Amino acid sequence: MKNPALLLCGVALAILGGCANPEIVKISPETYMLSRADRAGIFGNTAALKAGVIKEANEFAEKQGKVAIPVSVRETPVYPGHLATVEYQFKVLDKNDPEAKRTGLIPRADVVIEKNEKVSADVRTKDQSNKQPDLYTEITKLDDLRKKGLITDAEFEQQKQKLLNQAK
């Protein structure tokens, strides 16, 4: 070991400098991703990092004569042992594309769980035409008719007996 201070300085640069930020990555025919990490550590500015990433995506699209439409953005703040990061996914579309008129991000779940099952069920509906009338309701109607004098006591008893026999 010739110079321990020089070695320590090299290790510090490797830790603080990290590896270079990747370029814009194409993830589908018109969708791209751009990731950046803020190398300033605790002195970094996540908002400035995010603004820079969006600006870079817009410049990338403008070079093609198109516009960048946001798909998703994921930010992680700085914390001990971790640099602040921004991952930005965007589509590059023609300026006249109807989707280019959309200005906001659509919230998306971080995790999507799909469960596909085949379910069979025996669903039956009540057939109203064959439905038996409610016995209590029908006797009450007959009693009401008797009280109003529209049927006699004998007719009431006869109809009531008929309903009771049908219910058996």
Image (cartoon, helix red, strand yellow):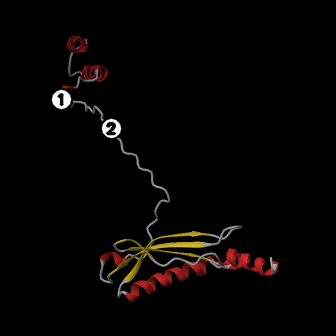
Provide the residue designation for mark 2: 119
N-term mark: 1 or 2: 2
Q: Nearer the viewer, residue 24 or 56?
A: 24
Few, some or many C-alpha atoms within 10 Å of disc 2 (few <14, some 14-19, many ≥20)? Answer: few
Position of residue 9 relative to residue 75, above or below, is: below
Residue at screen point 81% across, 80% down: 2
Q: Is residue 126 left or right of residue 80?
A: left
Label drawn at residue 37: none
Residue at screen point 60% across, 81% down: 48
Q: Splitting the image into 4 quarters, where does residue 154 fall?
A: top left
Label drawn at residue 129: 1
Of the two numbered discs 1 and 2 in the rendering, the one whose residue sits closer to the viewer:
2
Q: Is residue 52 left or right of residue 104?
A: right
Q: Is residue 161 left or right of residue 13?
A: left
Residue 98 drawn at (x, y percent): 30, 77
Type of amino acid at the residue the image marks with label 2 = Val
Residue 135 drawn at (x, y percent): 28, 19
Q: Secondary structure at mark 1?
A: helix
Few, some or many C-alpha atoms within 10 Å of disc 1 (few <14, some 14-19, many ≥20)? Answer: few
Residue 69 drawn at (x, y percent): 41, 77
Residue 82 drawn at (x, y percent): 66, 68
Quadrant location of the C terminus in the rendered image: top left
Residue at screen point 52% across, 80% down: 53
Q: What separation in Å lies between label 1 and label 2 (alpha carbons)?
A: 30 Å
Position of residue 148 relative to residue 67, above or below, is: above
Residue at the far left: name it: 129
Q: Nearer the viewer, residue 46 or 41?
A: 41
Residue at screen point 46% across, 78% down: 24
Type of amino acid at the residue the image marks with label 1 = Ser
Counting every numbered tag in the picture gives 2
Q: Secondary structure at mark 2?
A: loop
Q: Nearer the viewer, residue 52 or 27?
A: 27
